[in-house]
Amino acid sequence: MRILLTHSPEARALYYGERALAALRKVGDVKLHEGSAPLDGDALIAAASDCQLIVSYRQSPGPAALFERLPRLKAFLRCAIDIRNVDVAAASRAGVLVTQASAGFVVSVAELVLGFMVELSRGIARSTIEYRSGRVPKARMGKELRGSTLGVIGYGAIGKEVARLGKALGMRVLVNDPYKKVKRVSLDRLLAQADYVVPLAVATAETENLIDAAAFARMKPGAFFINVSRGNLVDERALEAALDSGRLGGCAIDVGRDPDQMPTPRLARREDVLATPHSAGLTVPAIEHQSMETAAQAAQIAKGRAPKGAVNAKYWRRK
C-alpha cells in the first residue's frame, strides 16, 4: 500500500513526529511532501495519483475533485478533529472512506488557558520585556485567580478541563452550554459576572460571531477575554472596539481569522493582547495522540476494516 503524508517538513516535525512516521511506514510505502507550502488542489491530486491512502494535514483540503480524480484512493485520513474542509458527501459518493482523529489536546489547551489567565492578571511578560529593554517597569496591582469568576462557554472536553482547573484554584466557575446536561447559567448572566470569559463552543454556522458587539457590551467592565477555540466564534471588529473603549481588561488569543486559524496580525500586535500562533495543542503528548491514531487507522484500513474515527463507513466501497 502506498500512503501520501501531506505534512510539509516543518509541519511533519511539529505535528506528526518520527514515532508516528515509523508506525505509518510499517503499514505501507510512505510518500512524503517535501515542499514548504501546503499541499492542495491539483498539486495534491498529482502527488496522490499512485497512492491508496492520504494522511492529511489540516491545510490540505479534501474537495470533491480529489475523490473524483483519484480512482485508486481508498481512504482520506485527517490528522485532526476538524474535517470542515473535507467534502465527505463527495467522498461517500466515490466510495472513499474519510476518518478523523480524536481529541488528544484537551490538557494542552486547558493548560494554556490557565497560563493566559495568570499572564493577563499579573503582566509577567510585560515586565520582562521592559527589563530586557533596559527599563524598570512600573509595579502594577495584580489580580488573584482564587475568588475570581471564570466563565466557560461550551462544556465539551476542553471546557470541562478548564472548569476543573478553575475550581482547583478556588475560582467560581460559571458554565453556559444549551446542549449539555450540566448545571449552567444563561449567557447573559455569565457575561455579566465573569472576570475571565473563555468561549470553547464548537465552530458552526450557529456559533459564527457568537461573541459580537452585544456580547462584549454585556461583559463585566475590566473582564479578560480568552479565545483558544476558533476565530469564527468572535467578531474581531467588535473585539477591537471593546479593547479600544477600555471595557476589557485585556485579551489573549491562540486563534483568529487569518489563514489556518492563526491570530489576525492586526489584533496580535496590540499591547493589550497576548497572542500565540495556534499552538495551544502543540505538545508532544497531544500531537502524538492524533498522529499515532492515524497510523493505527491506516493499519486497520490495510486489513479492510473501518477504523475508529471513520465518519462514512457505510459508504466505503474502495477496500
Image (spheres, rainbow, N blue to C red):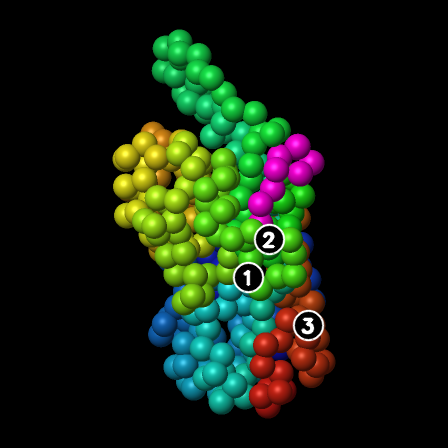
Q: Is residue 175 left or right of residue 251?
A: right
Q: Which residue is mark 2?
A: 184
Q: Residues within 10 Å of mark 1 (few under 14, many from 20)?
A: some
Q: Earlier in the sequence, mark 1 or mark 2?
A: 1
- CB of mark 2 within 8 Å of CB of mark 3? no
**Residue 282 rendering spot, x and y as whole percentages:** 55, 46
The residue located at (47%, 17%) in the rendering is: 141
Amino acid identity at mark 3: Lys
Separation (CA) of disc 1 from disc 2: 8 Å
Query: Quick one: 266 or 195, which is closer to the camera?
Result: 195
Q: Which residue is mark 1?
A: 178
Amino acid identity at mark 2: Arg
Residue 174 magenta? yes
- Residue 273 visible at all: no
The residue located at (41%, 32%) in the rendering is: 222
> What is the span of residues highlighted in magenta in the rendered image?
167-175
Marking on residue 308: 3
Label 2 SS: loop
Q: Is residue 12 above or below residue 60?
A: above
Query: Quick one: 110 or 82, which is closer to the camera?
Result: 110
Q: Residues within 10 Å of mark 2 (few under 14, many from 20)?
A: some
Marking on residue 9: none
Question: Residue 104 sits in which quadrant?
Answer: bottom right
